[in-house]
Amino acid sequence: MKLATTAKLPKKTSAKVNDPDNPAWTEGMLGAPVLKRGRGPQATPTKVLTSVRLDADILEFFKSQGAGYQSRINAALRMELERNLSGRPSPTTRKRLVA
């Protein structure tokens, strides 16, 4: 028959030990709580998360110029969009040309 063994209880120590070199923290020492979560309100309109397939050499070109390559790709696409929109007639002008 096996004898049951019991673990020894931990040694009881006083939780309030006064140490002048290491005083207990007080609310005044901690200061006011700082609650900061998330990014907060956006200064500019948020961008849309999407997936675009680019040729490897195009992506390598923009990445080789350093950090911010996605913003540079966005700027290049915006320039192309503005170039194409400025050269095209408006839809109302197009109707007058066709008629």
Image (cartoon, helix red, strand yellow):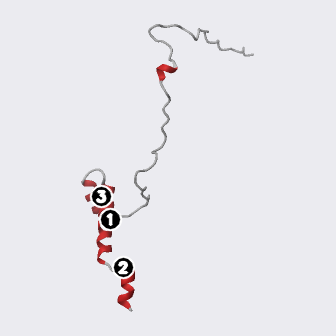
Amino acid at pointer 3: Arg
Q: Are marks 1 and 2 in contact (CB under 8 Å)?
A: no
Numbered tag placed on residue 72 in the rendering: 3
Give left or right: position of 34 versus 9.
Answer: left
The quarter in which the N terminus is drawn is: top right
Mark 1 and mark 2: Cα distance apart in space? 19 Å
Residue 72 lies, in percent from the top left, at 29, 58
Q: Callout 1: few (<14), some (14-19), or many (20+) C-alpha neighbours within 10 Å?
A: few
Q: Dot 1 corresponds to which residue?
A: 78
Count the labels in the image.
3
Residue 24 lies, in percent from the top left, at 51, 14
Amino acid at pointer 2: Ser
Amino acid at pointer 1: Arg
Numbered tag placed on residue 90 in the rendering: 2
| Mark nearer the N terminus (3 vs 1) | 3
Helix, strand or loop at mark 3: helix
Q: Give the residue at the far right of this rendering.
A: 1
What residue lies at 32% left-to-right and 78% top-to-bottom?
A: 88
Q: Give the residue at the far bottom of this rendering.
A: 99
Residue depth check, mark 3 versus mark 2: number of the one nearer the observer: 2
Mark 3 and mark 2: Cα distance apart in space? 28 Å
Residue depth check, mark 3 versus mark 1: number of the one nearer the observer: 1
